[in-house]
Amino acid sequence: MYTLLPIEEYLMPESLSDALSLLQEYGESGKILAGGTLIYELLKRKILKNIKALIDIEKLKLNYAKEYEQGICLGSALTYTELLDYLYSRKVPNETMNVLNA
């Protein structure tokens, strides 16, 4: 049985600027969706209430890891698996990987 979630709008902005505008428009009643399994569970169990809009940022391509002189910048939608893949591809020391996989 499927339960309808108490959300008025499901939005997929095309740009970061659009996403920020939507967040400003909806304020506390708008929530970012990036992956989504946890937020759906929180809504279903009525832990999160009064949510008018889910703002899905999948189209914004924020699942990146980029290296800079100062360190690594991780995108807000980067998954744990993508992070591990990135670190393995950069031959990160085993000690670091052991901590991440614990």
Image (cartoon, helix red, strand yellow):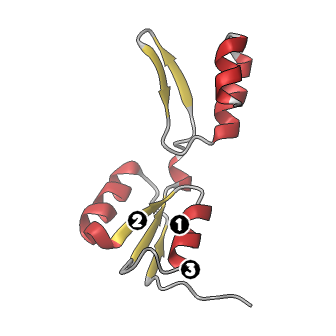
Q: Quadrant of the C terminus?
A: top right
Which residue position holds label 2? 31
Of 99 and 63, the residue lying toward us? 99
Which residue is rendered at x = 73% and y = 19% of the image?
89
Which residue position holds label 1? 39
* Image coordinates for residue 46, horizontal then vertical, percent: 48, 81
Which residue is rendered at x = 69% and y = 88% of the image?
2
Q: In this view, does 11 lie to the left or right of 30?
A: right
Q: How far apart are marks 1 and 2 (CA)?
A: 9 Å
Q: How crowded is mark 2: few (under 14 residues within 10 Å), some or many (20 or more)?
A: some
Q: How crowded is mark 1: few (under 14 residues within 10 Å), some or many (20 or more)?
A: some
| Vertical comparison of 77 with 31: above or below | above
Q: Which residue type does callout 2 highlight?
A: Lys
Q: In this view, does 20 lie to the left or right of 66?
A: left
Which of marks 2 and 1 precedes in the sequence? 2
Which of marks 2 and 3 precedes in the sequence? 2
User: Is disc 1 in contact with disc 2, using a CB cutoff of under 8 Å?
Assistant: yes
Q: What element carries label 1?
A: helix
What number is the disc on residue 9?
A: none
Q: For residue 5, say whether it is visible.
A: yes
Q: Which residue type does callout 1 highlight?
A: Ile
* Image coordinates for residue 67, horizontal then vertical, percent: 52, 17
Which residue is rendered at x = 49% and y = 56% of the image?
57
* Image coordinates for residue 30, horizontal then vertical, percent: 36, 69
Which residue position holds label 3? 44
Q: For residue 91, say whether it is visible.
A: no
| Vertical comparison of 41 with 35: above or below | below
Q: How crowded is mark 3: few (under 14 residues within 10 Å), some or many (20 or more)?
A: some
